[in-house]
Image: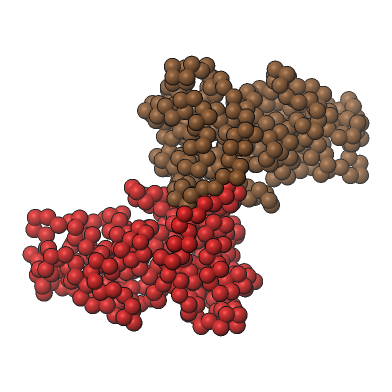
Chain colours: A red, B brown
Amino acid sequence: MASADSPRVRVFAPATVSNLGPGFDVLGLALHRPGDVVEAELSDRPGGELAGVTGDGGALPLGTGRNAASVAADEVLRRVTGAGRPPGLRLWLHKGMPLASGLGSSGASAAAGAVAANEALGRPLGPEALVECAMAGERASCGAAHADNVAPAIVGGIVLIRSCDPLELVRLPVPDGLFIAVVHPHCEVSTATARARLAGRAFALPDIVANAGNLGALVAALHQGDLALLGRSIDDRIVEPLRAAMIPSSTEVRSAARDAGALGCGISGSGPSMFALCDSDDAAARVALAMRQVFRDRASLGSEAWVGPVNRDGAHVLP
Amino acid sequence: MASADSPRVRVFAPATVSNLGPGFDVLGLALHRPGDVVEAELSDRPGGELAGVTGDGGALPLGTGRNAASVAADEVLRRVTGAGRPPGLRLWLHKGMPLASGLGSSGASAAAGAVAANEALGRPLGPEALVECAMAGERASCGAAHADNVAPAIVGGIVLIRSCDPLELVRLPVPDGLFIAVVHPHCEVSTATARARLAGRAFALPDIVANAGNLGALVAALHQGDLALLGRSIDDRIVEPLRAAMIPSSTEVRSAARDAGALGCGISGSGPSMFALCDSDDAAARVALAMRQVFRDRASLGSEAWVGPVNRDGAHVLP
């Protein structure tokens, strides 16, 4: 059954905005663009073999045990290996998004790797199991097996991680009329470094209470379709204050986004990308422009932007 | 216009369960019973005068500036005093619930005081302003102006406090089929002492993340009518671990509640009362019995219990 010349499957998994203000490690949403593509085919050689990486400028490890895509695919194989199963997979990763951008780059690779492996094997696993496999890829890549990027990258939409162990996802409604602007300034913040800043820290109860109020309001706003409430809820007193200092002019970017009509604005994941929620495609385009302008004028940083609605579908097979 | 012989209004405000697991200071729900009654009538003497208190066993301060009901009424007067307004109110507080029980005793008094004052004055204030007035009563009574008891006591249902300053309430849906058992063991935990235990403490990120996941899931569960998810979300890693030790056998009570069929169980407010969420009136009655039995057998504590659905209406005028 295993065959080196079985057809290749190609899977796209999108970038994601995690945290969304008060939801550190528990909230994420999927974008339509950018994203990664993983190709996979069955192989007689046991395990997952990363045969090639493009689009990363040579930055990513090719070693199968350290690349998010192949670790995730390996984990899929590990779970389904048994009588009649092919022993191995050969994988190609095509990075279509910047590394260390705060847009879930390793998460997109891990998600695409897990879903591509699952497709090549005939879809033995369901979405929650695939998220667990992709979490193994995240752990290999950045040291922490968080699900707030890989879950929305795989299932799409806006996802709450109630619990990582055992994994429990809660899919939240995506209000009509919600659009997102994401701006990636050309400076790097490594997820591992950003997370190391948080290690061992303790947080005060008033800030925890403020975050809880905003997180609860955010989840209510999504269900009630209340975009103004959603925007007011994008406020984090726990993690963002520590991370804002790592991103040049981030405070001014946030002000500019709000002045340009954003409902709310914050740091995407561990940054340096920032996101803004808007109530129309036009507003999101205007807001992205205003944010880029501040990065350019205040911090002399080039940037790129993506604008659009939430990706409700997540990872999918390409023709 | 002000007259010492104007008709008295009588207002009932209910007990409340605050925190609800992961929602310290941001979540509360209203019960049908027990609760407090405040009578109010216009008076020519300026300010709010507490003319009498019954049902407290002599424990409550009669001084107008220290009683939650009269401070709240005073705050209503302060906000509406102006041309043609009567200068004062005379108030009577009838405690219908235990003090220092964790069921929002001072909150019920403050809520009843604010609403009764508002009624006597011809309803000049809306619900959010009344919650702010009642918060002043909470501050006088326990030192902290939290809204998670007075908000549900006034507006009813299940309420999220997004922010205290400025006050912003988010009313959450009450799923059909949700019933609550509340058990008050006969020991005292003062809110001020319980809050003092938390003062200056700092909390670790993994516990904050776990609470955020549960709080988000709880709000989603209320909107989605998912009682099982609601029950799983009743878990607090921040405050309850510190408070559980103040309540004899609280861990065993929680286990007994779950064994008897509760969806979830936790400490009500700062305790010692404990609450359990259930999916039927019968289940709630059974669960209350099991909880009382543990308090009696393990901790030699008498107790009383209340069982029923959420009070969707909150404070109301009595005939």
Quadrant that contains the C terminus of chain B: top right
Up/down of B200 relative to B180, above or below: below
Image label count: 0
Rendering coords of residue B95 (x, y %): 69, 23
Q: Along the horizontal axis of the image, is B164 left or right of A95?
A: right
Residue B143, image quadrant? top right
Q: Residue at x 36, y 64 (%)?
A: A142
Q: Residue at x 62, y 33 (%)?
A: B193
Q: Residue at x 33, y 73 (%)?
A: A36
Rendering coords of residue B291 (x, y %): 45, 23
Rendering coords of residue B176 (x, y %): 48, 37
Rendering coords of residue B178 (x, y %): 47, 34
Residue B14 in sight:
no
Residue B87 in sight:
yes
Up/down of A114 relative to B211, above or below: below
Q: Along the horizontal axis of the image, is A132 left or right of A268?
A: left
Q: Residue at x 89, y 36 (%)?
A: B86
Up/down of A2 relative to A80, above or below: below
Residue A8, image quadrant? bottom left
Depth check: A245 or A148 in front?
Answer: A245
